[in-house]
Image: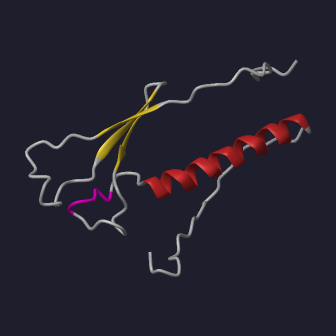
Amino acid sequence: MDAGLNTDNAPEDYTAVVEWTRGDQDFLDHRYSRAHMLRFDGGAVVRASSSPHVVRVPMSDAAGVDPEEAFVASLSSCHMLFFLDFASRAKFMVDLYRDAAVGVMGKMQMGR
């Protein structure tokens, strides 16, 4: 039996709470902040926003994680976890893993 691995076939639920509040912004003029919070079941809270490449500052919060960055990070994290498990099973010693992951989002034929 592998230590720490879930070996049953039961489906798992993964949850996140995405929370945005309007505050005193007009909203109906479409000039509202896209800054929001991501809350995870383990207690982690992440500052998030739309990408400033998509919605300009100050409507975006450049310090927040945008959905595109979160997607790239999730893929990189999954790859790292697979690699570490594979290396451990093969008895390879790993002291550090670092991935400077990059995602590229282009435009489709219609310019979007």
Q: Quadrant of residue 62?
A: bottom left
Relative to 26, 36 lies left or right: right
Task: Pick whichever, 36 or 83, lies toward us.
Answer: 36
Residue at image location 35% in from the left, 57% down from the top: 50
Can residue 96 be seen from the camera position used here?
no
Q: Is residue 85 left or right of residue 63?
A: right
**Picture coordinates of residue 31 (x, y %)?**
16, 60
Splitting the image into 4 quarters, where does residue 58 fall?
bottom left
Placement of 4 over or under 91, stated as above or below: above
Residue lying furthest right = 90
Q: Nearer the viewer, residue 36 or 108?
A: 108
Residue 18 point in image, percent of width and height: 37, 38
Residue 61 position in % (x across, y down): 28, 56
Q: Residue at x 73, y 43 (%)?
A: 95
Q: Which residues are magenta?
A: 58-62
User: Which part of the image, by quadrant, shows the N terminus?
Assistant: top right
Across and down, in percent, residue 66 comes to: 41, 54
Q: Is residue 25 left or right of residue 109?
A: left
Q: Is residue 98 visible?
A: yes
